[in-house]
Amino acid sequence: MSKRVLAVDPGEVRIGLAISDPLCMIARPLKVIQHASRQKDAEAILTEAEAQEVGTIVVGIALDMEGDVGPQARRALRLVEVLRSLSDLAVVTWDESGSTVAAGKPDALIDARAAAVILQEYLDAQHTQT
């Protein structure tokens, strides 16, 4: 059986996490962690990944309207670099444009729901490729 997938919706204040089911078919919101520093954020994400028996981490990258990397995406890519330097887990990026809007009304779990939107799009894409 393949390992679960953890999605990360990195924000400047909060970071949303979502987890797949063991079959990697369905995404669900997991939790929201408060942004501290890139290093501490990466360590918290990896601690959660280990606890959830994750094989892949998907980090949402906010591309602009032209599909280019802007300031938010650059911050997320720096987080990806730290995650990769601290772990042997596969760390991949996924265009998260529109995920927060798709996640619904703003509340305490909006960032985790946004991560679940990112993860579900990623999982669906993986299953259409097989």
Image: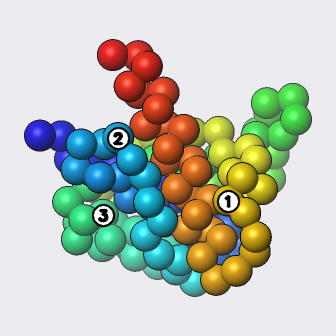
From what the image shows, is residue 98 above or below residue 101? above
| Along the line of sight, the residue nearer the viewer: 102 or 50 | 102
The image quadrant of residue 87 is bottom left
Residue placed at 38% from the left, 58% from the top? 19
Amino acid type, mark 2: Met
Q: In 3D space, how far apart are the residues under numbered discs 3 and 1 (Cα atoms)? A: 22 Å
Q: Residues within 10 Å of mark 3 (few under 14, many from 20)?
A: many
**Separation of residues labelled 2 and 1 (CA atoms):** 18 Å
Evaluate if marks 2 and 1 touch, with contact meaning CB atoms under 8 Å apart: no
Residue 96 point in image, percent of width and height: 66, 45
Disc with the residue nearer the chain's start (3 vs 1): 3
Closest to the observer, 91 or 109: 109
Which element carries disc 1, helix, strand or loop?
loop
Q: Residue at x 22, y 50 (%)?
A: 22
Q: Is residue 38 visible?
A: no
Label of residue 103 in the image: 1
Q: Residues within 10 Å of mark 1 (few under 14, many from 20)?
A: some
Residue at the disc numbered 2 = 25
What secondary structure is marked by label 2?
Answer: loop
- Left or right relative to 43: residue 124: right
Residue that mark 3 sits on: 49
Q: Earlier in the sequence, mark 2 or mark 1?
A: 2
Q: Which residue is depicted at the point 62% across and 59% down?
A: 114
Q: Where 123 falls versus 56 (above or below)?
A: above
Establish if 107 lies above or below 90: below
